[in-house]
Amino acid sequence: MTAPRLPRALTGLAGALSLLAGALLLVLAVLTVADVAGRSLFDRSIVGTVDISTMLLVGVAFLGLAAAQVDGRHVDVDLVEARLPQGARVVLAIVRCVLLVGLGAVLVWGLTDQLMSAYDRGETTNDILRLPTWPAKLALVVSYVLFFVTAIWSTVNDVRVLRRGEDLAPSWADQAADESLLVTPAGSTGAAAGGTTDTATAGTTDTAPGGTTDTEGGAR
């Protein structure tokens, strides 16, 4: 039986936020290069670079959380759990799910409170542009909500798989490790076992007095 999958809408939204994070990273890189080039060549920097970079970094750092969870790219150490019997693994998966629900509720509640406070007070950055901070905090809330929903859904799927007596799908790190073992390193072409091939060619040209030319060559 195939392992349960995450809803397509959930994975699609996570992928869209990941693409947005990549686009913001590109904008951040272009802005940084332009600012450095302006200071080096024209002795003038771009106004508000610090403010803009700070806001962009929030999106770059957190918008890809859910996509990493969907792809199984978060750090996952199962050294002990993988050696436990099936029943113990089911219990651990349930405990993990409960902890995710509790931690997610606390974090999302706290971040939402910060978001509403920043919006109501008109909180801004401290640099020249005085940009409002609520968009960055909104990105945090959305990122963590989607991450915890994805993580909890994935853990519930793990519980269902383990209760059927099946093994969990290998993580991304395990798959990468297995693929690396299949890669044959490039080696030099040498002599085959049981036989050698050795070819040498030598030649000398001697010119005798009177214009006589004598050429010797040998091969083994």
Image (spheres, rainbow, N blue to C red):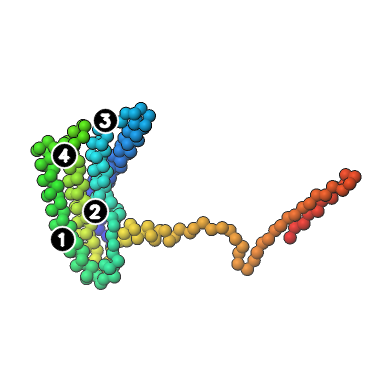
Q: Position of residue 88 (x, y in %)?
A: 22, 70
| Mark closer to the chain start, 4 or 2 | 2
* Secondary element type, mark 2: loop
Residue 164 visible to the viewer: no
| Mark closer to the chain start, 3 or 1 | 3
- CA distance for labels 3 and 2: 44 Å
- CA distance for labels 4 and 2: 30 Å
Which residue is denoted by mark 1 in the rendering? 98
Which residue is denoted by mark 3 in the rendering? 47
| Mark closer to the chain start, 4 or 1 | 1
Kindly indicate the quadrant of the structure image that contains residue 119. top left
| Mark closer to the chain start, 2 or 1 | 2
Kindly indicate the quadrant of the structure image that contains residue 157. bottom left
Looking at this rendering, what residue extends furthest in the top direction?
Answer: 42
Q: Is residue 100 left or right of residue 182?
A: left
In percent of the image, x 74 and y 60: which residue is there? 220
Q: Nearer the viewer, mark 3 or mark 1?
A: 3
Q: Nearer the viewer, residue 133 or 8?
A: 133
Q: Nearer the viewer, mark 3 or mark 4?
A: 3
Q: Amino acid at mark 2?
A: Leu
Q: Amino acid at mark 1?
A: Val
Which residue is denoted by mark 2 in the rendering? 6
Q: Nearer the viewer, residue 138 or 209?
A: 209
107 versus 80 height, above or below? above
| Mark closer to the chain start, 3 or 2 | 2
